[in-house]
Image (cartoon, rainbow, N blue to C red):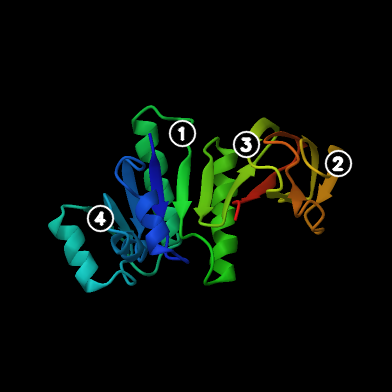
Amino acid sequence: MKVAVVANGEWDAAWGRGELAGNHIEMLICADGGGNKAIASDRIPDVLIGDLDSITKENLEKCIAAKTTVKQYPCEKNETDLELAVAYADTYLDSQGCFQDEIVLYAAGGKRLDHLMGNISIMIAYAEKGRRLKMKDPKSDAWVMLQGKENIKGSIGQQLSIVALSDDARVSAEGLYYQLDMLNLAHNSPRGISNVFTDKDISIEIHEGKVLIYVQMPC
């Protein structure tokens, strides 16, 4: 299933209109102020979740009128609104037997660095339990990759970064300008940033550790 979660970060409403179209996303879950983002792109969320201190009164009323499932939590809680929204999406996919389907995260970057880092930590947690969260915006796709191998399609000249999220990560890659052969990446070093596609289909293998894969969209 195509399930997406909209957070309350940076958002391009015109771009989002195409991304959230009904034939692209079957289930849309918004984390509080993410409801404002979705509605600005002409999509009423199927689920609105969080402490509801960021969504406007007008947009909340639109959700209620459209019979959106609204789940309100107290402001004083351990989880962030996005964490609650992702947990809802994960449980929903499990209930549908979609154990390997990814969840797309929109508006999960920008605005606040602490929120971005927290959102990446959520991506790590779900990667470790076998659920991929793909953070998507007009300029990039990003996801956490653990041990294993996968192919990534792109365009020649497109940039890709591999950032270690564990103390050490051992990585191999083919089809990039800087070929990687069992290269050790450390979490306290930026080595691995701004590599370049030399082929339209590259392969990346993580032998140890965990990394963030960041693919910059073509201009």
Q: Are marks 2 and 4 in contact (CB under 8 Å)?
A: no
Density class for disc 4 (Cα within 10 Å; few <14, some 14-19, many ≥20) is many
Q: Are marks 3 and 2 in contact (CB under 8 Å)?
A: no
Residue found 23% across the figure and 67% down from its top: 59
Camera-side mark, 3 or 2: 3
Amino acid type indicated by mark 4: Ile
Mark number, residue 153: 3
Mark sitting earlier along the chain (3/2) = 3
The residue under label 2 is: 183
Q: Is residue 122 left or right of residue 46?
A: right
Mark sitting earlier along the chain (2/4) = 4
Q: Secondary structure at mark 2?
A: strand
Amino acid type indicated by mark 3: Lys
Amino acid type indicated by mark 1: Asp
The residue under label 1 is: 101
Q: Secondary structure at mark 1?
A: loop
